[in-house]
Image (cartoon, rainbow, N blue to C red):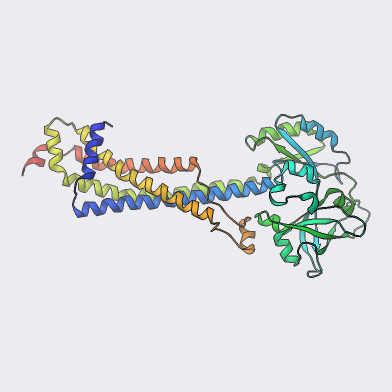
Amino acid sequence: MSALALEVAVRYLKSRPSRLVSSVSLLSIGGIALGVAALVIAMGLLSGYRSEIRDRLIGANAEVVLFPMTAGGDADPAAVEARLRRLPRVRAVAPVIYQPGVAASAATPDGADAVLKGIDPASERTVSELDAYLPDAARAIATSSPGSPAAVAIGRELARRLDVKEGDPITLSVADNAGGRFAPRTGRFRVGRVFRTDFAEYDAEWVFLDRQELRRLAHMPGQANVLEVRLDTTRDTEAATTAIRAAAGDAYSVSDWRSMNGGLFSALAIQQTTLFLVIGLIVGVSTFNIIATLVMTVQEKKRDIGVLTTLGAGRWFVARVFLALGGLLGGAGVVAGVVFGAAVCWVMTRFRLLSFDPGVAEIYFVSYIPFLVRGIDLAGIVGGSALAILVASVLPAWLASRIDIADALRYE
């Protein structure tokens, strides 16, 4: 598009059109701005939701986990740990124990379902974001001493259900892993810390305690029943998992964060694509106002078009003028929509306006959703809007290029 055609289009914008054309122009800019803003906010919401779930899943666990195939856990995981640490993508390995159980208190003797995670704080912080929600974990989950039970850290929502606070006693019950009896094994502990991850499932069920304390409570013969592996990056996790599987051998089953939550992330991706297409129709409908604005401008500027044609301007030049005019009108709407949508996302995230109470958080998994404005989303929104605006400008531009000179200048 030539600079002259763009200059003529800018002059048309600066000229004083009729009130009707001016009103329709403002409506077309406003309609596109609202549609683009709705797309920015919707994509920011879903991108933030996916990012929050992913960060919480990886932050409380690790990118890759290994499960020993032998019952009762691996009696000596040190050998496989050494092999894994030699892999180039592996940054840290930590042995842990997972046990389903029941947590009870004096206020709630019937108890609540819980997931007990036995960890070594020093190694666990190398594979997960433990310090982010459980700082000074070694003190929070201290081992037992004469006259003092072992301390555990429990999620905020679980503490609310049990009606306990830091320092209060609780009991934990797990199945006997030795297989010698069917009765559960129960131990007394004290609440050393109440933590909050903002991930509803963890805050409502998780209990952290020292790995050896949980091993004794569960009467587990092995040192660990899960090995957590931290990678250098979450990109290309599948290739790293394949290398880890080969190094671990047949004695372990290997899974990564994508395979364990593949259905959830696939559903979110489909939802985001569908929402983009549906809300994108708002932008498509808004372009009809651009068509109306350009058609009326063509009629209003018919004499100018005739003069330009007599001065040697070709049909393609006239068409380019109105394509540029449509681009300027639509571009103003897109820019305004992106700025407004990004501002709304910033406010929603800065003041944590989209937060849920515990009941709703159980449905959405998280208690708070940030709005994440990604460059790739903005590129898709701007590119799709530009295409719709271009298509909407083609018909008026073609009509302008077909105006007959004699008809345009007949009454001049």
- Residue 359: horizontal and vertical position, in percent? 63, 64
Q: Which residue is drawn at 76% across and 31% down?
A: 246
Query: Would residue 410 be found to the left or right of residue 338 on screen?
Result: left
Quadrant of residue 327 in the image? top left
Q: Residue at x 21, y 43 (%)?
A: 12
Residue 263 appears in the picture as rendered: no
Q: Residue at x 24, y 46 (%)?
A: 294
Image vertical order of residue 71 relative to residue 201, above or below: above
- Residue 251: horizontal and vertical position, in percent? 82, 37
Quadrant of residue 153 in the image? bottom right
Q: Which residue is drawn at 58% across and 59% down?
A: 355
Query: Would residue 341 be found to the left or right of residue 152 on screen?
Result: left
Relative depth, front residue between 275 and 332: 332
- Residue 68: horizontal and vertical position, in percent? 82, 41
Quarter of the image with the C terminus is top left
Residue 212 appears in the picture as rendered: yes
